[in-house]
């Protein structure tokens, strides 16, 4: 099955002739959070473009742009830290809680943060 | 990455900065409702309605909004018209600024460093890789997008389409032709 066919078969990923626009649901979520926070006025689009650009130009960024949404997410975290909204330690802690909740959730059930045995 | 995004979404929701339902609406909009078909309708209208083409030339932001395609980032739009002596091509050397409201989300190559760096330095070889060979005497003009100003290329209307309605014309307008890395389809190719 070609990449294009795979994209068409995946019901929630938008596709174009280059394949899916988002390669995974988390990319769409990260994209939408930035759009929503900008609409709320947390930052200007110009500020965002510069923050994203800094991540895209980092020396370890992939030459083929395959880590675009990884850069996008790092830029979002950097922006949130610079605006005093949330820092990396708080995000790290909650990420770990989600991982624990995922491991503690039986297959086929929705993963809920309440399932975190370490909470 | 998925867990980290979930964590962020949880924190931002708890702080009242985002509403998960609104996030879903944004995702759905970009997945299903916004895409290059919007831009194709703008181009088809410009081809068939000289008054609209003139408006697009003078104030692309307003002309495009009149068709119901508004920008979410408050960006201004500029339409750049291909002609017999000039071919236009769009890039964002800074990051990946793109006219989302008319073209949807950018393709992978548009965001990738090779295109971002080479489009300005050597546009003709980039065009050749896209299969676009232009006459040597045709000028190539490259437009660098910013957060405030995004460009939409209006490709040349293919010959042999006299009397076609907008819907039929729109089917000839590809995404790449509106970025400038392609041309509109020829009628016999559809």
Image (spheres, grey):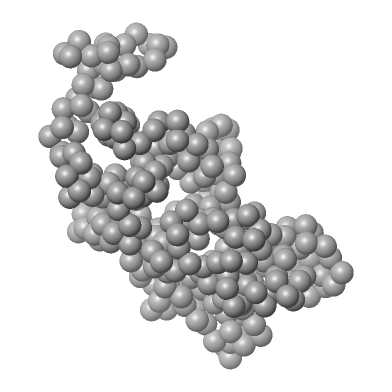
Whether residue B19 sits left or right of residue A83 in the image: it is: right
> Residue B57 in the image: x percent, y percent?
61, 77
Q: Residue furthest right?
A: B163
Q: Residue furthest bottom?
A: B137
The residue lying at 70 percent from left, 71 percent from top is B52
- Image quarter for residue A7? top right
In the picture, the quarter occupied by the N terminus of chain B is top left
The residue lying at 21 percent from left, 21 percent from top is A97
Above or below, A47 relative to B20: below
- Image quarter for residue A28? top left
In the picture, the quarter occupied by the C terminus of chain B is bottom right
The residue lying at 39 percent from left, 43 percent from top is A36
Task: Pick the residue in front: B89 or B182.
Answer: B89
> Residue B125 in the image: x percent, y percent?
47, 76
- Image quarter for residue A100? top left
> Residue B95 in the image: x percent, y percent?
35, 61
> Residue A49 in the image: x percent, y percent?
32, 59
Whether residue A69 sits left or right of residue B180 in the image: it is: left
Residue B92 shows in the view: no
Above or below, A98 relative to B34: above
Whether residue B16 sits left or right of residue A25 in the image: it is: left
The residue lying at 22 percent from left, 28 percent from top is A95
């Amino acid at each position: 099955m070609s990449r294009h066919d795979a994209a068409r078969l995946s019901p929630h990923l938008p596709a174009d002739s280059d394949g899916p626009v988002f390669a995974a649901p988390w990319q769409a979520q990260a994209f939408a959070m930035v759009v929503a926070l900008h609409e709320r006025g947390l930052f200007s689009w110009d500020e965002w473009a510069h923050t994203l650009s800094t991540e895209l130009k980092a020396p370890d960024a992939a030459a083929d742009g395959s880590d675009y949404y990884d850069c996008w997410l790092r830029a979002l975290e950097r922006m949130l830290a610079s605006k005093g909204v949330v820092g990396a330690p708080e995000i790290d802690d909650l990420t770990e809680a989600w991982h624990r909740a995922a491991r503690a959730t039986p297959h086929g059930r929705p993963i809920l943060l309440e399932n975190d045995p370490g909470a | 990455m998925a867990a980290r995004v979930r964590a962020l979404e949880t924190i931002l929701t708890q702080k009242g900065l985002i509403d998960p339902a609104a996030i879903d609406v944004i995702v759905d909009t970009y997945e299903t409702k916004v895409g290059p078909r919007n831009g194709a309708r703008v181009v088809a209208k410009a081809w068939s309605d000289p008054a609209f083409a003139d408006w697009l030339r003078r104030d692309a932001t307003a002309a495009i909004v009149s068709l119901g395609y508004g920008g979410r980032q408050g960006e201004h739009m500029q339409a750049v018209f291909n002609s017999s002596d000039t071919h236009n091509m769009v890039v964002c050397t800074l990051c990946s600024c793109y006219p989302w409201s008319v073209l949807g989300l950018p393709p992978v190559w548009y965001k990738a460093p090779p295109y971002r760096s080479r489009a300005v330095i050597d546009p003709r070889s980039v065009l050749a890789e896209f299969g676009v060979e232009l006459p040597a005497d045709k000028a190539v003009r490259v437009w660098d997008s910013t957060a405030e100003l995004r460009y939409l290329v209006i490709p040349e209307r293919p010959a042999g389409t006299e009397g076609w309605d907008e819907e039929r014309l729109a089917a000839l307008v590809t995404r790449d032709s509106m970025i400038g890395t392609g041309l509109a389809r020829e009628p016999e190719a559809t």
